[in-house]
């Protein structure tokens, strides 16, 4: 029975996404004029766009600029943002990214992605559950930052970038 439901759910998701894609220009035009979209179209848009945000945030290498673009699209089309789902997805992403920084403390790119995701959560999902990510970042600050600062002072550019990104992440969490 579960397999049947999975197939039906996937079919429904695809149909709503296709409806939204076909009607997106109309939804934008209605929103610009302050006209409320028909319920069927707003439901399709809400489902498609919130689902797109969730999938982008679940990716191994999340495209945060694409997430921002979809969030802007939700606003431009006057579509309801599922703030609870956004907060949950961002919280999970931040936990994963903070763990990556702790596991690979010599990767300035991982720290930069963490900082960018923390800034996104700060701007767009202030109610996100950040407790675990905050704890991991605190652990990185207390255990790893002093040594990276010393390396940075000796001219290690990667360590300097890592320190700056970690401090930026900490300020947003």
Image (cartoon, grey):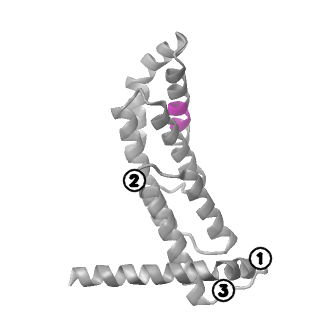
Q: Position of residue 26 (x, y in %)?
A: 70, 82
Inter-mark Cα distance, 2 to 3: 32 Å
* Element type where label 2 sits in the image: helix
- The answer to whether 83 appears left or right of 98 in the picture is right
Where residue 99 sits, quadrant-wise, is: top left
Q: Main secondary structure of the magenta part?
A: helix
Query: Where is residue 50 shown, x and y percent of the image?
Result: 51, 69
Q: Residue at x 47, y 69 (%)?
A: 51
Q: CA distance from mark 1 to mark 3?
A: 11 Å
Q: Which residue is mark 1?
A: 32
Q: Which mark is residue 92?
A: 2
Look at the image and give the residue range highlighted in magenta.
165-170
Q: Name which residue lies at 45% across and 65% down.
A: 85
Q: Nearer the viewer, residue 139 or 11?
A: 11
Q: Residues within 10 Å of mark 3 (few under 14, many from 20)?
A: some
User: Mark 3 sits on what residue?
Assistant: 37
Counting residues from the start of the chain, the first of labels 1 and 2 encountered is 1
Task: Relative to 98, say whether 161 is above or below.
Answer: above
In the displayed orientation, state which residue is furthest to the left.
1
Does the segment drawn in magenta span residue 76? no
Q: Is residue 103 above or below residue 85?
A: above
Tell me the residue at 61%/82% (across/down): 22
Q: Is residue 70 above or below residue 123?
A: below
Quarter of the image holding residue 101?
Answer: top left
Alpha carbon of mark 1 to alpha carbon of mark 2: how far?
34 Å
Residue 120 seen anywhere in this rendered image of the structure: yes
Circles 1, 3 touching at the beta carbon (< 8 Å) = no
Find residue 83 and name its label: none
Q: Secondary structure at mark 1?
A: helix
């Amino acid at each position: 029975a579960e397999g049947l439901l999975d197939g039906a759910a996937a079919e429904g998701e695809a149909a709503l996404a296709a409806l939204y894609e076909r009607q997106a220009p109309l939804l934008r035009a209605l929103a610009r004029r302050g006209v409320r979209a028909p319920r069927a179209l707003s439901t399709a848009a809400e489902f498609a766009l919130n689902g797109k945000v969730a999938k982008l945030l679940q990716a191994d290498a999340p495209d945060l600029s694409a997430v921002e673009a979809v969030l802007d699209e939700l606003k431009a089309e006057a579509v309801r943002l599922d703030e609870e789902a956004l907060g949950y997805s961002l919280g999970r992403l931040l936990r994963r990214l903070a763990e990556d920084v702790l596991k690979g403390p010599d990767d300035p790119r991982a720290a930069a992605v963490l900082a960018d995701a923390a800034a996104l959560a700060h701007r767009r999902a202030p109610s996100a559950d950040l407790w675990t990510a905050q704890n991991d970042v605190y652990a990185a600050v207390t255990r790893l930052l002093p040594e990276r600062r010393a390396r940075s002072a000796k001219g290690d550019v990667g360590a300097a970038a890592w320190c700056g990104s970690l401090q930026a992440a900490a300020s947003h969490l």
